[in-house]
Amino acid sequence: DSGSITWYLQSFFVDSLITLKEMINYDRESCGGIDYIIEEGVKDFVYVYLSNEVISDSTLQQLKEHQIDNLGLNKKLVLKNQTESPLKDHLKNNNLFNSYHSKLGFKIHIYTMRNEAKYVNQYQETLFQSDWKKEMLYFLTNFPEISGYFTDFPEDWRNAFENQVEFSDRN
Protein backbone atom coordinates (compact mmCIF):
# COMPACT_ATOMS: atom_id res chain seq x y z
CA ASP A 1 0.00 0.00 0.00
CA SER A 2 1.74 3.16 -1.22
CA GLY A 3 -0.23 5.36 1.20
CA SER A 4 0.87 3.57 4.34
CA ILE A 5 3.27 5.04 6.87
CA THR A 6 5.65 3.17 9.13
CA TRP A 7 6.69 4.93 12.31
CA TYR A 8 10.02 4.05 13.89
CA LEU A 9 9.78 4.59 17.62
CA GLN A 10 13.14 4.47 19.33
CA SER A 11 14.46 4.67 22.87
CA PHE A 12 17.64 4.06 24.85
CA PHE A 13 15.45 2.69 27.67
CA VAL A 14 13.99 -0.81 27.38
CA ASP A 15 11.21 -0.17 29.90
CA SER A 16 10.09 2.98 28.07
CA LEU A 17 10.01 1.14 24.75
CA ILE A 18 7.97 -1.73 26.23
CA THR A 19 5.53 0.68 27.89
CA LEU A 20 5.12 2.65 24.67
CA LYS A 21 4.41 -0.54 22.74
CA GLU A 22 1.84 -1.68 25.31
CA MET A 23 0.13 1.74 25.30
CA ILE A 24 -0.13 1.85 21.52
CA ASN A 25 -1.41 -1.74 21.35
CA TYR A 26 -3.98 -0.96 24.07
CA ASP A 27 -5.14 2.21 22.27
CA ARG A 28 -5.47 0.36 18.97
CA GLU A 29 -7.56 -2.39 20.56
CA SER A 30 -9.78 -0.19 22.73
CA CYS A 31 -10.67 2.91 20.72
CA GLY A 32 -8.58 3.32 17.62
CA GLY A 33 -6.00 5.26 19.66
CA ILE A 34 -3.04 6.40 17.62
CA ASP A 35 -4.68 5.47 14.32
CA TYR A 36 -7.70 7.58 15.23
CA ILE A 37 -5.58 10.56 16.30
CA ILE A 38 -3.68 10.78 13.04
CA GLU A 39 -6.77 9.61 11.14
CA GLU A 40 -5.16 7.49 8.43
CA GLY A 41 -2.04 6.09 6.89
CA VAL A 42 -0.21 4.47 9.80
CA LYS A 43 -0.03 0.77 9.14
CA ASP A 44 2.93 -0.25 11.24
CA PHE A 45 5.06 0.71 14.20
CA VAL A 46 8.66 -0.46 14.45
CA TYR A 47 10.17 -0.36 17.92
CA VAL A 48 13.93 0.18 18.00
CA TYR A 49 16.11 -0.21 21.07
CA LEU A 50 19.08 2.18 20.81
CA SER A 51 22.48 1.45 22.29
CA ASN A 52 25.94 3.00 22.42
CA GLU A 53 27.46 -0.17 23.84
CA VAL A 54 27.32 -3.94 23.60
CA ILE A 55 23.89 -5.07 24.76
CA SER A 56 23.67 -7.52 27.65
CA ASP A 57 22.12 -10.96 27.17
CA SER A 58 19.41 -10.15 29.71
CA THR A 59 18.40 -7.01 27.79
CA LEU A 60 18.36 -8.93 24.51
CA GLN A 61 16.14 -11.57 26.12
CA GLN A 62 13.80 -8.91 27.50
CA LEU A 63 13.49 -7.33 24.04
CA LYS A 64 12.73 -10.70 22.45
CA GLU A 65 10.10 -11.49 25.09
CA HIS A 66 8.27 -8.28 24.11
CA GLN A 67 8.71 -8.89 20.38
CA ILE A 68 10.99 -5.91 19.93
CA ASP A 69 13.33 -7.17 17.24
CA ASN A 70 15.08 -4.02 16.02
CA LEU A 71 18.33 -2.67 17.42
CA GLY A 72 19.65 0.81 16.75
CA LEU A 73 23.40 0.73 17.15
CA ASN A 74 25.85 3.59 17.20
CA LYS A 75 27.89 3.35 14.01
CA LYS A 76 31.10 3.22 16.05
CA LEU A 77 29.87 0.02 17.71
CA VAL A 78 29.68 -1.96 14.47
CA LEU A 79 33.33 -1.26 13.68
CA LYS A 80 36.30 -2.61 15.58
CA ASN A 81 38.81 -0.17 17.03
CA GLN A 82 41.26 1.56 14.69
CA THR A 83 43.63 -0.87 13.04
CA GLU A 84 46.78 -0.44 11.00
CA SER A 85 45.09 -1.78 7.90
CA PRO A 86 41.77 -0.31 6.71
CA LEU A 87 40.54 -3.58 5.24
CA LYS A 88 36.85 -4.31 5.68
CA ASP A 89 37.49 -7.70 7.31
CA HIS A 90 39.59 -6.02 9.96
CA LEU A 91 37.05 -3.30 10.65
CA LYS A 92 33.77 -5.17 10.74
CA ASN A 93 32.75 -6.35 14.19
CA ASN A 94 31.73 -9.84 13.06
CA ASN A 95 31.11 -11.05 16.62
CA LEU A 96 28.45 -8.41 17.08
CA PHE A 97 26.70 -9.23 13.81
CA ASN A 98 26.89 -12.97 14.40
CA SER A 99 25.32 -12.55 17.80
CA TYR A 100 22.63 -9.91 17.18
CA HIS A 101 21.66 -10.59 13.59
CA SER A 102 22.53 -14.17 12.64
CA LYS A 103 21.92 -16.02 15.91
CA LEU A 104 19.19 -13.90 17.50
CA GLY A 105 17.45 -12.51 14.42
CA PHE A 106 17.49 -8.83 15.33
CA LYS A 107 17.28 -6.27 12.54
CA ILE A 108 20.11 -3.78 12.81
CA HIS A 109 19.78 -0.05 12.21
CA ILE A 110 22.75 2.32 12.43
CA TYR A 111 22.73 5.85 13.84
CA THR A 112 23.51 8.67 13.24
CA MET A 113 24.77 9.10 9.72
CA ARG A 114 25.47 12.73 8.94
CA ASN A 115 26.87 14.72 6.04
CA GLU A 116 29.15 16.92 8.12
CA ALA A 117 32.87 16.10 8.12
CA LYS A 118 33.20 16.45 11.89
CA TYR A 119 30.68 13.61 12.39
CA VAL A 120 32.12 11.15 9.90
CA ASN A 121 33.47 8.26 11.93
CA GLN A 122 36.38 10.04 13.60
CA TYR A 123 38.49 7.03 14.47
CA GLN A 124 38.40 5.79 10.91
CA GLU A 125 39.73 9.00 9.36
CA THR A 126 42.22 7.15 7.17
CA LEU A 127 39.44 5.11 5.63
CA PHE A 128 36.79 7.80 5.09
CA GLN A 129 38.98 10.93 4.90
CA SER A 130 36.13 12.87 6.58
CA ASP A 131 33.98 12.27 3.48
CA TRP A 132 30.43 11.25 4.42
CA LYS A 133 29.79 9.75 0.96
CA LYS A 134 32.78 7.42 1.38
CA GLU A 135 31.48 6.46 4.80
CA MET A 136 28.00 5.82 3.41
CA LEU A 137 29.34 3.72 0.53
CA TYR A 138 31.54 1.75 2.93
CA PHE A 139 28.59 0.86 5.16
CA LEU A 140 26.26 0.06 2.26
CA THR A 141 28.87 -2.11 0.55
CA ASN A 142 30.27 -3.97 3.54
CA PHE A 143 27.30 -4.40 5.86
CA PRO A 144 24.46 -6.17 4.03
CA GLU A 145 23.07 -7.21 7.43
CA ILE A 146 22.05 -3.64 8.23
CA SER A 147 18.33 -3.05 7.72
CA GLY A 148 18.40 0.73 7.85
CA TYR A 149 20.14 3.93 8.83
CA PHE A 150 19.07 6.92 10.90
CA THR A 151 20.26 10.24 9.53
CA ASP A 152 19.74 13.92 10.22
CA PHE A 153 20.01 14.56 6.48
CA PRO A 154 17.58 12.21 4.69
CA GLU A 155 17.46 14.24 1.49
CA ASP A 156 21.25 14.21 1.07
CA TRP A 157 21.42 10.50 1.84
CA ARG A 158 18.63 9.70 -0.61
CA ASN A 159 20.24 11.78 -3.37
CA ALA A 160 23.66 10.23 -2.81
CA PHE A 161 22.16 6.76 -2.65
CA GLU A 162 20.13 7.17 -5.84
CA ASN A 163 22.54 9.22 -7.93
CA GLN A 164 26.14 8.68 -6.94
CA VAL A 165 26.69 5.37 -5.22
CA GLU A 166 28.00 2.51 -7.32
CA PHE A 167 26.70 -0.88 -6.16
CA SER A 168 28.75 -3.12 -8.39
CA ASP A 169 30.77 -4.32 -5.37
CA ARG A 170 27.77 -4.87 -3.12
CA ASN A 171 27.19 -8.43 -1.97
Image: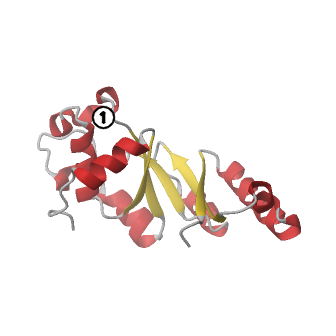
Residue furthest out toward the top: 118
Quadrant into which the N terminus falls: bottom right
Q: Residues within 10 Å of mark 1 (few under 14, many from 20)?
A: many
- Measuring from the top left, give residue 53's x and y in whole percent: 46, 44
The residue that mark 1 highlights is: 120
The residue at 14%/44% (across/down) is 86
Q: Is residue 16 left or right of residue 32?
A: left
Using the image as rendered, state which of residue 141 and residue 72 is in the foreground. Answer: 141
- Measuring from the top left, give residue 108's x and y in whole percent: 44, 59
Q: Is residue 147 visible?
A: yes
The residue at 57%/53% (across/down) is 49
- Measuring from the top left, give residue 93's x and y in whole percent: 30, 54
The image quarter in which residue 6 lies = bottom right
The image quarter in which residue 63 lies = bottom right
The residue at 30%/64% (across/down) is 144
Residue furthest out toward the front: 3
- Give SS at disc 1: loop
Residue type, numbered disc 1: Val
Q: Is residue 111 left or right of residue 23?
A: left
Quadrant into which the C terminus falls: bottom left
The residue at 71%/62% (across/down) is 40
12 versus 70 height, above or below: above
Using the image as rendered, state which of residue 119 and residue 155 is in the foreground. Answer: 155
